[in-house]
Amino acid sequence: MVIAMFFNRPKILEDESLTSYLYRLSDSNYYDSPFLFTKLMGIKLHELNANDISYTASQKISELISYNKDELYERTLTFHNLDKKTSQMFLMKSKVKFCQYCISEIPHHKWIWSFYCITYCDKHHTLLIDRCQVCQSHIEIKALMNDECPNCKCNLSNVGDEGTIQQSEVYQMQLCLLQKLKRVDSSTEYFSSSSFFEFLYFIKSSMFILEGLDSFIEPFNQKITSLINGRSGRAYSNSQYALACGNVYWMYHNFPEKFYKVLERFEMQIDPNIKKRRRKKFEELFNYVNFQFIEDAYKKFIRGKIENREVRQNLPLYNTKVKELAQSKFLTLKELIQEAGLTRNEVETLISKEYLIPEVIYYGQKKHYKFSKVKSFEQIKKYKRLKKDLITKKEVASMLGVYVEKVNLLVNEGFLRIYKLPTSAHALFSSKEIKAILSSIDQLTVNKGEETYLLHDIIRKFAFKGVSIVFLLKKIQMGELTPFATKRYPKLSEISFYQKEIELCILKEKLDGDICETFGLREVSRLLKIDDRMVITLIQIGLLKPHVIKETTKGKKRYYFNQQEVHAFKLKYLSTTEAAKLTGTSRKILQKWVRKQEIKNHLEGYSHNFLLDKDELMDQINKKNIK
């Protein structure tokens, strides 16, 4: 069995990388190298040495040594899921650094040491060593595990240290980094809500401002250098990187005073041709919400420089955000679109409708717009409030719990008003007016013993007597009906009425005159359980006559039917399924009578369906019974 090959399994050390443990595991089982693991895990040797081990490979190792696969995976660099650029900036893969005191007892490598930004040992409070102290050669993982420099053969654990770190900016930054890296809550005010990846990006972005400046912390005469001009650790120095990270901490300590000092020195010491690129890289940090406070302070600094005429007047050296500050009273069309959160079509439509009135400027033959920031945003706020309040006809129907066709009826009767947006040709409605209608419905306790009906049940039951939604709403306004509901802002379909009040209103209406309601095409199709095309067919045949036909602006016809006409049709005509259910006769017999012309199919020649006259059918049934 393969497991027998790893009978000796040393204990995994605190924060030890998976690569380090595999080296020790192979040595404990008398293998010359961990090359065997690359075959077992299906990875290459350079991936093993870089601790770049996948979850699948970690799972295979866990099966061999009976150790939790997730804990093993957390000891790899792959676990942190950094993109390629960030990995090049922050991860050591071909070389290692170490604490001589940690490896003096058992040579091993900690996964946290693989990050360039981790520059000290949190256990012994000393700077990490990134090269042999005797010959200055870089160290690889194999040499570290053997505790021997491959160049000068000295013991790495006995070459002296780089010095201890006291309570300084370097120490505080390392503390923040370790807290983020080990996912421990940070007590630092500005960085507590940011993730480890965001924190790394924050350090990287800040380096673009600090790189090349004189150090703000001891030693003051040293230049700040990091990795932003190098790749994969070329010319890397752990002590220099520690100094750079310490300056990042200093830069944001007592914010924003020290931040402004760094920006002042950046303006003075950095070549103008380099500033533009560096600023652009630094401003990428503003894409993260957690660093909004830095963007605000940065803008304030640039604004002060411009107002005090302390920057060069050729603004192309600055990015678009700086131009915004220089032109804080006016905005271009592109800037207005970005700041207002509107589309280009919306803004251009608002201009054409004279809702926004910009100043027109011509550069040659090309026309440009210049907007007053204050006035334009006042108009845009009004437009956005109106846009937020207005809803479509379908949304109104959904809020009220009625068919879309009923919305036009409510408009015609004055219960709803039609509004227009400057950017839309559609009829829109105010959601506030809808809520006002619904808020008039009281939340009452139902009187016991009194029969109640929901609105739609009332319309279905008393439709022939002229009861409609408009009829009920008018009676509510007149105080003749007391609607109630079990919740606030109910839909019309969710309100109820007392039966006695309904019957009293109907009786009174009969004395005053007849009332009638019309149905739309879709309501008729739902009521008759047929599709819209069949309703049109019935109109063409003459079996169903619309009360009113209206033509829209687009040339489409709208059909409205008398309620009593529709119910009369439903009582007069039957499908074969309904006829079979009514008479107890099979559909085949009914279809046979139609073929023999004993009864008439009123859809013959127009549809494959059957439509039978109820009176004709009953006469036929009586004849068959007589025979």
Image: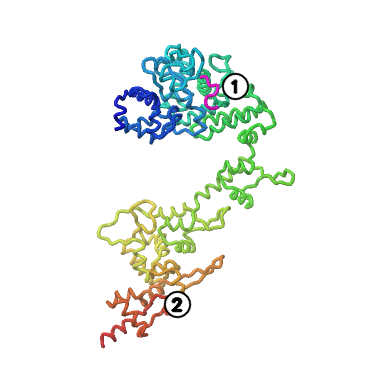
Q: Nearer the viewer, mark 2 or mark 1?
A: 1
Instruction: Check disc 2 and report the residue beneath it.
Output: 606
Q: Secondary structure at mark 2?
A: loop
Can you give x and y, in whole percent of width and height, for residue 123 in the image?
39, 17
Rendered image: mark on residue 354? none
Q: Is residue 430 left or right of residue 625?
A: right
How packed mark 2 is, by other alpha carbons closer than 10 Å (few <14, some 14-19, many 20 or more), is: few
Quarter of the image containing the C terminus? bottom left
Can you give x and y, in whole percent of width and height, for residue 308 in the image?
66, 26
The mark total stands at 2
Instruction: Check disc 1 and report the residue beneath it.
Output: 212
- Residue at 50 percent of width and 31 percent of height: 86
How packed mark 1 is, by other alpha carbons closer than 10 Å (few <14, some 14-19, many 20 or more), is: some
Q: Secondary structure at mark 1?
A: loop
Residue that sits furthest to the right in the current view: 364
Quarter of the image containing the N terminus? top left
Q: Amino acid at mark 2?
A: Tyr
Tell me how far mark 2 sits from mark 1, CA to CA.
88 Å
| Residue 184 visible within the image | no
- Residue at 51 percent of width and 14 percent of height: 135
Looking at the image, which is closer to me, 492 or 31?
A: 31
Can you give x and y, in whole percent of width and height, for residue 546 in the image?
46, 73
- Residue at 64 percent of width and 22 percent of height: 268
| Mark positioned earlier in the residue sequence (2 or 1) | 1
- For the record, the magenta segment spans 231-237
Q: Is residue 456 magenta?
A: no
Q: Amino acid at mark 1?
A: Gly
426 w.r.t. 77: above or below: below
Looking at the image, which is closer to me, 362 or 123?
A: 123
Dividing the picture into quadrants, the one containing residue 529 is: bottom left
